[in-house]
Amino acid sequence: MGRKRTKSGKIRLAEVAELAGVSPITASRFFRNPEALSVAKRTRVESAAKELGYVPNLAARALASQRTEVIGVLIPSLTNNVFSDVLRGIYDASEGGRYSIQLSNTRYSILQEEKLLRLFLAQKPAGLIVTGIDQTTESRAMLEAADCPIVQIMEIGPDPVDMMIGFSHYDAARAAVAHLFEQGRRRIGFVGARMDPRVQRRLDGYVSAMKDAGLFEQRLVVTTATPTSVTLGGALFTDLLAREPDLDAVFCANDDLALGVLFECRRREIAVPEQIAIVGFNDLEFMASAVPTLTSVRTNRYEMGKTAATMLIEAIEGRRPEQPVLDLGFKVIERQSSTSRHSDSRPSVSGAGVANKMVALPSSHD
Amino acid sequence: MGRKRTKSGKIRLAEVAELAGVSPITASRFFRNPEALSVAKRTRVESAAKELGYVPNLAARALASQRTEVIGVLIPSLTNNVFSDVLRGIYDASEGGRYSIQLSNTRYSILQEEKLLRLFLAQKPAGLIVTGIDQTTESRAMLEAADCPIVQIMEIGPDPVDMMIGFSHYDAARAAVAHLFEQGRRRIGFVGARMDPRVQRRLDGYVSAMKDAGLFEQRLVVTTATPTSVTLGGALFTDLLAREPDLDAVFCANDDLALGVLFECRRREIAVPEQIAIVGFNDLEFMASAVPTLTSVRTNRYEMGKTAATMLIEAIEGRRPEQPVLDLGFKVIERQSSTSRHSDSRPSVSGAGVANKMVALPSSHD
DNA sequence: AGGAACGTTGACAGCGCTACCAGCAACGAC
DNA sequence: GTCGTTGCTGGTAGCGCTGTCAACGTTCCT
């Protein structure tokens, strides 16, 4: 048998075809669109491929077909747990399929994002997932010119490039503040870090809600460009408290900050929620088991990633969703840290009081 | 000019070569090994490429050269913050270079790992980063037969496939227990979740240290295969306490569990560290700002990822490290939760006591 | 019976790049 | 002046696969 092998001993499509007694192109079709083959040939090629342990050469396929099976994903941070949940959803949705995920980290820089986008687009990805709606003009133009489906994730806005899935950070922040109003809180501070566009919109939502109630004051807002951390939450809260000693609640732009605020309150023997209520954002797992349990705005991060990837793959394969913009919503999960009555938690093992030292209650709520 | 373009309007190497007045192969060399060209041609090709906005076609390059510039990374989890730090290191080290990272998630299954490994190897990656040292026999064989550099990360062991970077989880656990011994603790419980090989080795280290001191008892160990979480830490600690009410310390296999234990202690009004000392593992950021601050075993996760990727790239390019196995070590960071004297923390704002209710001290320590 | 329509198959010609080897000039050694 | 040696450059021939189009057999219609 003069059948030639590639130097590295790899099995090529031609070998499979020969063993199956079909032409290479027929074997090729088997791997891309099995339904197009007659049942007889289909089984012949299938068993030949299995027998030889054939694995397609993706580079050759990409070169010949002039497209890749790569889905590019641009996210701003690998550290932030928020994105790890989204990513997990994306990877889960793509698993077992033909598409592979190519991840890049923009580090919260839209210029970096533009650079990476250019890089991605040059390789003709099958599809693209990008974070947010605040691209540079240049990036935006590239995205619109790209001949592949694109999903923007993390938030929704008025003008999608293509598809979009997320929720309104503005509305979510307003809902969080509304919840605090319902609990009788008036002097509500805002603590934010990093101040990326989504955090900025949460701040905007907070500001508008406070203004609507006639309660907004600039000194209630403490923000920094520094990346978020639990420790930072404590530090920012310390600042806030120095500016506004009569504070009765804090809305934190994320849960890490909220945890830091909680710890700082403990350190200062400030009773939570009696003296100060705390509300976080994202509803990370630990919020439900902190003492007191911490109120947060739940966002569907895993689902967002998973749905984004699923929609994208569908669109790549020609089945565009009838609904290109998906609002996944949010939900304020009310817990002890903002509700005074300690209602939702598992019953305190140690009896009444849940170990919170009572301190003079602010007069503003019941 | 009859210069033909690819249908999609993309610039090819041939166009660059033509504009520069050299042969395609010379232009090709410019992108792979500029030093091989005379200075004159080098600048000609460079400016031609820039003028045309040339971007190499990686698929064609991979097909022609029979190798890819992909670094495969196999990690067991995307959720675990531990891996997000390692990943960040890997991405940082690869950024700007020619290699792209291809990430896959084994979900803590060595069979899944084997499957993914087969997939990766079929595409001839430039290098591979795999987690841990517990591969299947089949995986191990594939790794040894692979003709690319390989780095095993997260731990070190006796028999590296190629390169290896990590630390001894066994020794780290022994050090944590030794620290608790030094603090006068004797009835030290172990709390572990997931029980992947590295957590298992931490347990082994704990067991051996306890046995050496003649203090080991099976009922001091509470583990579960469930994925880790803060809430789970509280639940496991509850079990442990039911089995062993005289407990005076808990060594947690990770920091999430430790935080859960801390919250559970607070819920039960158990004084930390007076009544029970807590030690975690990994030293995540929040450990330093919890109240009380939490002792943990610091591991160099970011550095591990960064160094692994750097070593790998060096090896791919033919510069093998003189030291193929790197022990990055660990460090027990002693904080309030295990040291009784509240020494290292920022001074308590609220004065003495840091709001911990004193409960009867166990007799075993000073 | 003729032909249209469909489903299935194969031949051919590249996709854009690089491995390989040959060639050429410049230089020094003998 | 001849020979190697070195440094640089180019021609040729694929890498393994798929797009395109033509051709075939079968069925069903007129």
Image: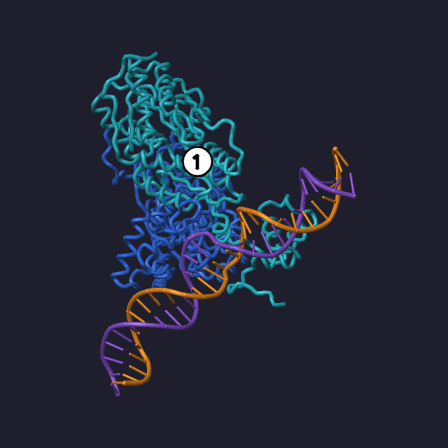
Chain colours: A cyan, B blue, C purple, D orange
Residue C3 horizontal/vertical position (percent) = 70, 40
Residue that label 1 marks: A150
Q: Which residue is at a point 31% across and 18% down the rendered structure image?
A: A208
Q: Is residue B134 visible?
A: no
Instruction: Quadrant for the C terminus of chain B, please.
Output: top left
The chain carrying label 1 is A
Name the spot of residue A258 as percent of width and height, x first. 33, 28
Q: Is residue A154 above or below residue B154?
A: above
Residue B321 is situated, as x and y percent measured from the top left of the image, at: 34, 62
Q: Secondary structure at mark 1?
A: strand
Work out whether residue A177 or residue B253 is closer to the camera in this orientation and state it: A177
Question: Vertical placement of A262 versus B248: above or below?
Answer: above
Left/right of residue A17 with respect to residue A209 in the rendered view: right
Residue B269 appears in view: yes
Residue type, numbered disc 1: Ile
Q: Nearer the viewer, residue B31 or A289?
A: B31
Residue B62: horizontal and vertical position, in percent? 44, 56
Residue drawn 24% across and 25% down? A240
Q: Residues within 10 Å of mark 1 (few under 14, many from 20)?
A: many
